[in-house]
Each structure stands twice: as structure tokens, then as C-alpha cells.
Amino acid sequence: MNKIHYQIKGSGPDIVLLHGFMESLEMWHPFLPSLTKDFSVVMIDLPGHGKSKCLDEVHSMPLMAEQVKKILEKENISKCTMVGHSMGGYVALAFAKEYPEYLNGLSLFHSHPFPDTEEARRNRARTIEIVEQDKAGFISSFVSSLYFEENRDRLKQKIERQKEIAREMKPEGITAALKGMKEREGSLDFLAETNIPMLFIAGKKDTRADLDKLLKAVALPSHSEVLILDRVAHMGFYEAPDKTLNTLHYFALKCSGL
């Protein structure tokens, strides 16, 4: 059995979708009817998530990026547009730094290029202890906090399904990802040097990505595009599905030369 689970749907230029922390490739399924009209859509369960196995006690961003590269090699994919949601954005940045020749475009979807602050590292260490003591309780509060409060009732079914996906994870998968995010490096120098077209998608109500700070990073790449969403927190593909899908779709078309 393969250690890393993935799905490929559609045909055409390749777009690679990387989910966030305690999510799975299922999060991207609502985008498939549109994206598969123009693209071969590669969706990957990152290590310890979904149907993918844990690989180590720490799932560093470079380690997860290496697994993505192995899948691209296996599928003979030499060029793609890569989209990373939240933690998936950290993985996408690690991939871009190590294997830039694979990318014709890169999107940080409710993600950012900054390392953890000292306070954030301490919080992740505390979170690891909480997960080990009360995984279910942590999941319940964490997942709900990803959504803007005004959207939670409307998206109740989506939130409950996301909690189910998270509850299916083994504690070691959750803690391995937390440890990997805790030790990750920043990517500002990379952004200042890269020629890869970049798309940033951000929510005004996202408490996990400071918008003012992010906008300073948006100015660094030679080609940047940005979508800023009002009344949206961290889950734009559910909180603002049409706007995020249309923006991603158009960006990937341009990057693929279509």
C-alpha cells in the first residue's frame, strides 16, 4: 500500500492542490466540477492526514514537499500550478524553494511566508500537550475557530464534516504536523528573488494570517496577485466558494498559458 494517498481528476495542464492542517484532499472536491474542465487536478493527502500514513515523528515542510515531488515524478508531471491552503501553503513554499523548475505558478491560500514567532512556537508546544490529553476537545474548538463567526451557522454541515475528517486522524499525525510547522523557516528571501507568479488569497477576518503583515510580503515577488475577502476568515473555499474558485481558476489558466 502506498504511504501517500492522492487522486487525479480531469485532463489538461496540471494543478496541484495541497490541503491544510487536520484537513484532507476531500476539502478540494467542491472545486472539481469547474477545475476538471481545463486541468488535470492532483489532490494529495499530506503525511499523517486523510488516508496517508505517518512518516516520522516530525513532518517538516521539506519532508512533505519531498513527498509531493515523488508523486509528480511518478505521474510524469514536469510543470504545474501549485495551490496550498494554510499548512499546505507552507509545504508549497518549501517545494518552490527546493524544486522551482516544476512550477509555473504558486498560490498561498489563507497562508503566509513567515516563520512562527516565539509566542507561536510556545503555543504549538502547548497544543501538542492538549492533543495528547484531549484530541476530540481540541478538534471541536479549533475547527470552528477557522470560520468567521457570522458564517458558522450557515456552514454548519461543512464544519461538522471537517471535524469528522480531523477526528479520523491519529494523534501522532496531528503532533507531527504541529512539530513541523513549529520548526519551519520563513520564505521572505525566496519571495524577493522568485520569478514564479504568485497569487495570495486572504480573509479580512482571518486571525491566523495578519493581513497588514501579509500585504508587505505580497509586494516582494516580481509577479503578485491578491484576493482579499470581506467577512471571511480562514476557509475561503467554503466561506466564499465562487470568488476563490474563479480567482484560482483564472490564475491557473494564465500560468498554464491558456
Image (spheres, rainbow, N blue to C red):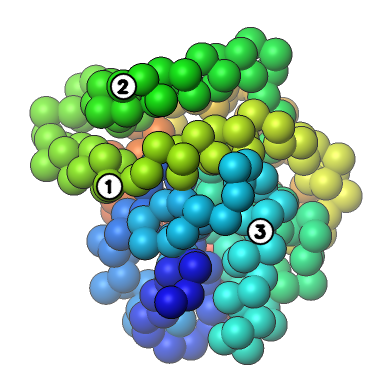
Q: Look at label 3 and name its amino acid.
A: Ala
Q: Look at label 2 and name its amino acid.
A: Asp
Nearer the viewer's eye, disc 3 or disc 1? 1
**Residue 65, numbered circle:** 3
> Residue 90's image quarter?
top right
Q: Earlier in the sequence, mark 3 or mark 1?
A: 3
> Residue 180's image quarter?
top right
Q: Secondary structure at mark 3?
A: helix
Q: Does residue 228 appear in this view?
A: no
Marks 2/3 in contact by CB < 8 Å: the verdict is no
Residue 80, horizontal then vertical, whole percent: 61, 74
**Residue 134, numbered circle:** 2
Using the image, determine if residue 251 lies above or below residue 148: below
Marks 2/1 in contact by CB < 8 Å: the verdict is no
Q: Nearer the viewer, residue 130 or 220?
A: 130
Q: Look at label 1 and name its amino acid.
A: Glu
The residue at the point 76 percent across, 35 percent down is 186
Nearer the viewer's eye, disc 2 or disc 3? 2
Task: Give the class, few, some or many, for how many residues have Cα within 10 Å of label 3's Cα (few <14, many ≥20).
Answer: many
